[in-house]
Amino acid sequence: MSTTRLTIRRPDDWHVHFRDNDMLRAVAPCTARHFGRAIVMPNIVPPVTTTALAAAYRQRILDAIHEAMPGDSRFEPYMTLYLTESTTREEIVRAAASGFIKAVKLFPAGATTNSENGVRDMDKVMPVFEQMVASGLPLSVHGEVADAEVDIFDREAVFIDRVLDPLRKRLPELRIILEHVTSAVAVDYVQSAGHNLAATITPHHLVLTRNAMLAGGFRPHYYCLPVAKRAEDRSAVRKAAVSGDARFFFGSDSAPHPRQAKECAKGSGGIFNAPTALSCLAGVFEQEGKLEHLESFVALNGPAFYNQPAATDRITLFRQEQPLEFPHRIPTADGPVTVFDPGFPLHWQVEDHGEPE
Ligand code: NCD
Ligand code: ZN
């Protein structure tokens, strides 16, 4: 008989964008409902470049969740520092001492949403990387070059070649998370790298190819960075995710943008998947016949790489013949935000507070 119920340790999300203010209040509860912890990306405006800014942002997140889910104080946001060419070693020491900052985020300048303050010249941040090794903070990486000459479908592979591999050779002790891998090249690279390198994988890159975004009409709600690639790439990413290999774990990259920023002449990259992410992952693991590895992907491999304990509480997923009905957009003060629809029926649901929803 096929599995219809699955109890696993409570999942964590190792890469999420919560934004700020009204948008934060609208989206953060969607993550807190299912996940125990999440690593919150620092690319808000202005970016979270100091420990003091991270502490204030963390409090705004806790307030937003408390307001939406009073009495539920389970969710823990983990923070990241936005690396700039002016980040100091002292700031890294402070960040590590804070206890709530778990990584420093490298955005190559120009690579993605709000990355203008990111890094242009890696030589300038080498002393900071050395301090991160000394202080035990890992580097979270948006792995794409922003070079206009490089084809957008090759930007991840070129980043590995030009930036990541030289950096790892220069400073092998630096622990690195290559975020949201999308290509067979990236998966192979992580698999061949040995220790100190891990990768996160998103629900949408397990599901989409560039055809889903581009063939038969452009679908802006499937546009995110790095962009989805060929079917062979998706297949490599899926294999890695369901393999149980401890170097691959879940990071949703849930990245909300209001409709007018997606459906326009120059749309922003980012897919908002927090409400459907777990159902979608369970569906993918089931399709691959690997439901037994879902727990390691969403709840064990991430904490292990970040040197955090695994969750002690559990959630139950159950399979229903009747597919999950989910809101296709959520209202926010900035306009509606489209929820990721993987394009297949979502049979798996999360049991809420012990009772099916
Ligand atoms: C993210 C965002 O909107 O903040 N966009 C995206 O396409 N994934 C930034 C990022 O993670 O690259
Ligand atoms: Zn992201």
Image (tube, rainbow, N blue to C red):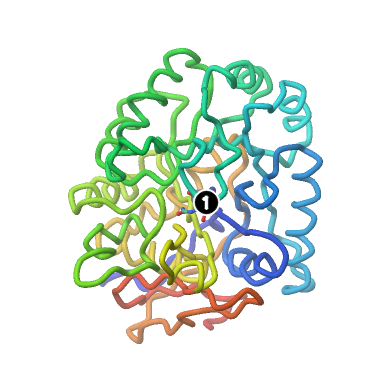
Q: How many marks?
A: 1
Taking the image as shown, residue 147 lies to the left or right of residue 90, namely: left
Q: What residue is drawn where x is 52% and y is 29%?
A: 120
Helix or strand or loop: what does disc 1 sit on?
A: loop
Q: Nearer the viewer, residue 158 or 320?
A: 158
Label 1 environment density (alpha carbons within 10 Å; few <14, some 14–19, many ≥20): some
Q: Is mark 1 within 8 Å of ligand 1?
A: yes
166 is higher (above) or lower (below) than 64: above
Task: Check disc 1 and report the residue beneath it.
Answer: 113
Q: What residue is drawn where x is 57% and y is 61%?
A: 314
On the image, which quarter does residue 157 sit in? top left
Taking the image as shown, residue 77 lies to the left or right of residue 165, namely: right
114 is higher (above) or lower (below) than 10: above
Q: Nearer the viewer, residue 331 or 261?
A: 261
Residue 74 position in % (x across, y down): 71, 61
Residue 289 position in % (x across, y down): 25, 59
263 is higher (above) or lower (below) than 166: below
Residue 133 position in % (x across, y down): 61, 20
Q: Nearer the viewer, residue 232 or 301?
A: 232
On the image, which quarter does residue 35 sit in? bottom right
Q: What residue is drawn where x is 62% and y is 27%?
A: 85
Q: Amino acid at mark 1?
A: Thr
